Image: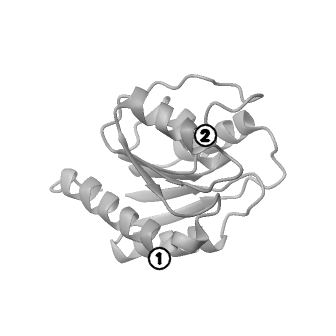
């Protein structure tokens, strides 16, 4: 099983948050890949890039997306079967993005959002979590969540443990 990270609009594929979460995934024996979307401004073109990568893989995937990468991961999950989706301050319900409604019946979906996010309103995550009937963790922190990275890591560990326990006994 492989964890595929999708970074935000103004960050890169191996920013500090992704590095920390990738280390957690490796601890769990999972492969990791972080897609480089730099130079692709349109979020829907990023979705196409992610789908092209996943369609060329033979492994099951867990999608992790931050900000615009959260949008990318969620929209891509509508077309592929991900074993889990973990979203950090996802850019949902944003004017100018191609999709404004999201369908998911994914049972392994969690969202983390900072109360002090100055870029993406945390209310958007509440709206989506309510519509999707999924777990939402509102924690101290701004959009980058760097001040709460220990909490984010703990939540990610719990998420991975849950996803892996539900896939136990299966060849990954």
108 on left or right of 171: right
Instruction: State the mark number for residue 166.
Output: none
Residue 147: x %, y % from top left: 58, 73
Instruction: State the mark number for residue 71.
Output: 2
State if disc 1 and disc 2 touch (CB < 8 Å).
no
Indicate the quadrant where residue 107 lies. Answer: top left
Residue at x 60% of width, y 61% of height = 34
Question: Which circle's residue, 2 or 1, is located before the other in the chain?
Answer: 1
- Residue 15 vertical placement versus 86 (above, below): below
Residue 49: x %, y % from top left: 68, 42
84 on left or right of 17: left
Q: Residues within 10 Å of mark 2 (few under 14, many from 20)?
A: many
Instruction: State the mark number for residue 23.
Output: 1
**Secondary structure at numbered mark 2:** helix
- Say how the picture is coloured: one colour
Image quadrant in which the C terminus is located: bottom left
Number of marks in the rendered image: 2
Residue 30: x %, y % from top left: 38, 67
Q: CA distance from mark 2 to mark 1?
A: 23 Å
- Residue 54 vertical placement versus 148 (above, below): above
Residue at x 19% of width, y 57% of height = 165
Q: Residues within 10 Å of mark 1 (few under 14, many from 20)?
A: some
**Secondary structure at numbered mark 1:** helix
Image quadrant in which the N terminus is located: bottom left
Judging depth in this view, the residue of 21 and 31 nearest the camera is 21
């Amino acid at each position: 099983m492989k964890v595929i990270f999708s970074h935000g609009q103004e960050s890169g594929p191996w920013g500090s948050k992704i590095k920390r979460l990738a280390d957690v995934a490796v601890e769990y024996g999972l492969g990791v890949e972080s897609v480089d979307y730099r130079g692709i401004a349109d979020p829907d073109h990023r979705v196409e890039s992610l789908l092209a990568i996943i369609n060329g893989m033979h492994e099951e995937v867990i999608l992790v997306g931050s900000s615009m990468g959260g949008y990318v991961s969620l929209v891509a999950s509508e077309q592929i079967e991900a074993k889990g989706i973990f979203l950090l301050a996802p850019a949902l319900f944003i004017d100018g993005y191609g999709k404004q409604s999201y369908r998911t019946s994914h049972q392994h979906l969690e969202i983390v959002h900072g109360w002090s996010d100055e870029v993406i309103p945390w209310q958007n995550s509440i709206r989506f979590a309510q519509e999707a009937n999924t777990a939402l963790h509102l924690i101290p922190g701004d959009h980058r969540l760097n001040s709460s990275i220990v909490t984010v890591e703990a939540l990610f560990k719990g998420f991975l443990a849950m996803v892996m326990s539900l896939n136990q006994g299966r060849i990954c």
